[in-house]
Amino acid sequence: MSLIKDKINSENLPQHVAIIMDGNGRWAKSRGEERTFGHKNAIDAVRNAINACNEIHIPYLTLYTFSSENWNRPTDEVDILMNLLAETLLLEAEEIFSKGLRMHVIGNLEKLPSLVRDQLLNVVELTKENTKGNLVLAISYGSQNEILNAVKNISTDVKEGKIDIEDINENLFENYLYTKDFPPVDLLIRTSGETRISNFLLWQIAYAELQFLNVLWPDFSKDIFFQCIVDYQNKERRYGLTGEQIKIQ
């Protein structure tokens, strides 16, 4: 039994946690290995994050799996990452299903190798009726492109008379994002000690709590996740109000 988990208030859980999984390369280098060794050893950390969310019933977990900028990495590394993703999907599909999790994928899937894209969509289809939690993989994802695409699609709908300019507000805009069916992010975690957002869910994290951990991703454990939740619960979320206003609501 985790002592840290026991500190969590089940009445004050974030509804949506997003994680920038960073540090695989440095973890491998510290062990005298190639970067790809870190990617292969990151799978346990992914399982830890998913299982921790599942145990305390956080309904949405989004993992920054492969960014649109990651396509610019060396071809050999990209190929290994794509092959690893395909292998992992085959191995983990049944586990995701058995946990009652529904998997979603956001990003420009057209850029993915057809094998990876097909396997992703197969798991999405396999789990579409599950209701115990939502696992969202951001793959070939970039938030700036997501926002630009939303603007283009809104512009097209205005031009075609489907909506009026006066109808455009935050709620309408969100319906044009990949994440239109998900709640906003409450907690964003980034590992590896870096303090950047890296083009991840820029709209969706407007009022999220941000936590930057000095932990490399392959070392991420359930207890580290649980501590992030405890730290989140010790924050006062004000949404632009004062502390006094929050207290009298």
Image (cartoon, rainbow, N blue to C red):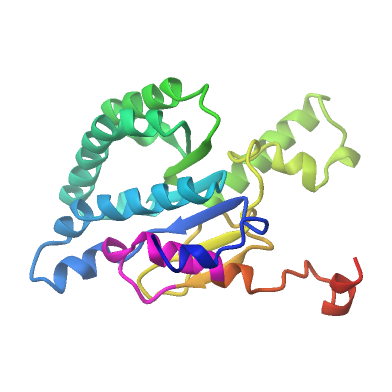
Q: Quick one: quadrant of the N terminus? A: bottom left
- The answer to which quarter of the image holds residue 179 is top right
Residue lying at the far front in this picture: please name it: 1
Left or right of 113? Residue 153 is right
Residue drawn where x is 40% and y is 25% of the image: 121
Please state which of residues 149 and 23 is positioned toward the viewer in this rendering. Answer: 23
Residue drawn where x is 17% and y is 61% of the image: 35
Verify whether residue 152 appears in magenta. Answer: no
How far across and how far down the image is residue 171, in percent?
Answer: 78, 43
- The answer to which quarter of the image holds residue 245 is bottom right
Please state which of residues 12 and 143 is positioned toward the viewer in this rendering. Answer: 12
Q: Indicate whether 9 appears above or below 54.
A: below
Left or right of 146? Residue 108 is left
Give the prevailing secondary structure in the magenta stretch: helix
Q: Which residues are magenta?
A: 213-230
Left or right of 65? Residue 218 is left
Please state which of residues 76 and 38 is positioned toward the viewer in this rendering. Answer: 38
Residue drawn where x is 47% and y is 40% of the image: 135
Residue drawn where x is 56% and y is 63% of the image: 8
How far across and how far down the image is residue 125, in percent?
Answer: 44, 20
Q: Quick one: quadrant of the C terminus? A: bottom right
